[in-house]
Amino acid sequence: MPSQNLESSATDSRALKVLLAGPRGFCAGVDRAIRVVEEALRRYGAPVYVRHEIVHNRTVVEDLEKQGAIFVEELDEVPQDAHVVFSAHGVPKTVPLEAERRNLLYLDATCPLVSKVHREAERHFANGGENSRHILMIGHAGHPEVVGTMGQLPAGAVTLIKDADEARTVQPENPARLAFITQTTLSVDDTAEIVAILRDRFPQIEGPKREDICYATTNRQEAVKRIAPECDLVLVIGSPNSSNSQRLREVAERSGAPKALLIPKLENLEWDALDGVNVLGITAGASAPETLVQEIIEALSDRFSLNIEERIVKEEHVTFSLPAPLG
Ligand code: SF4
């Protein structure tokens, strides 16, 4: 396991060991989505409209707003002749259709790993013909990625499975013609349990070899699992509406950390939380910039004598190119 030791300069304050989980923070899909907005601003000038938070992180959104991006929830808030970017989470098919109807110039920043799930769903549906399978989507109700993926197919083609209980009780019309897909940012362990229930109840169900949970979600959960048993507290840097950040907090607590807190940034850290903490774990969700982690470490170093150790469970070398109009 590669590790890295960094020593703090503070000398006369209480000792605190910090275990930094690696990988943490930005994934390739988030990095690409931000580059899409920045490149659109560079090429077309401000303002560029973005439908929904480009990624679920307020710091990223505010930074892009300063550069001239305007965030809206629906296309009817976008004026005629404007450029609009669709967020990394993906959109239902109706959204690009509506953009085309209005002659809006749109750029799709959907993560390629989400688009891959969209294509899987379409393949299983097979145009509703005789080879069509009804799809069970494992995911969180109302999350934009789930709305986008379910929206690739006509209403009724996909049933959402939110948890193990629903996997146990779902009553599909034709159990012999089923498939499953998953949201990309779920808990690896919870999803494995749900898939096992579905495979047990419906042996002919089709699905991906591994779940659709992406490499970034998997690696960040694995990294926090490794440090959690040694920590008195784990801080997860990320926004409350970030699914993969929420899962990191849960995984940390389930893996042995007595407590894990999800905080968007330094100003949300309540210092009392560190009372009695000798080993602090830190990780960050896939949409949280590394600058937010470094801000916290700097503030910690003003109060504690830090011994920082980075535990990297996997090197990541994934990058995605920009979508066609910008690539
Ligand atoms: S978390 Fe995974 S699916 Fe989501 S944007 Fe990042 S790489 Fe893509």
Image (tube, helix red, strand yellow):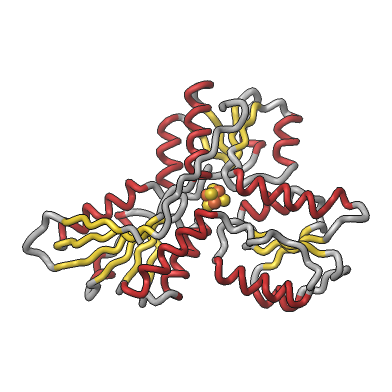
Measuring from the top left, give residue 274's x and y in whole percent.
25, 69
Q: Is residue 162 above or below residue 290?
A: below
Q: Is residue 47 above or below residue 309?
A: above
Q: Is residue 130 left or right of residue 264?
A: right
Q: Residue at x 65, y 75 (%)?
A: 164
Q: Is residue 107 left or right of residue 284?
A: right
Q: Is residue 152 left or right of residue 321?
A: right
Image quadrant where one finds the C terminus: top right
Measuring from the top left, give residue 135's x and y in whole percent.
78, 60
Numbered disc total: 0
Q: Residue furthest front?
A: 1
Q: Residue at x 47, y 48 (%)?
A: 27
Measuring from the top left, give residue 147's x and y in whole percent.
67, 53
Which quadrant of the view contains residue 175?
Answer: bottom right
Which quadrant of the view contains residue 207?
Answer: bottom right
Measuring from the top left, give residue 56's x and y in whole percent.
50, 50
Q: Residue at x 47, y 31 (%)?
A: 38
Q: Nearer the viewer, residue 313 or 88?
A: 313
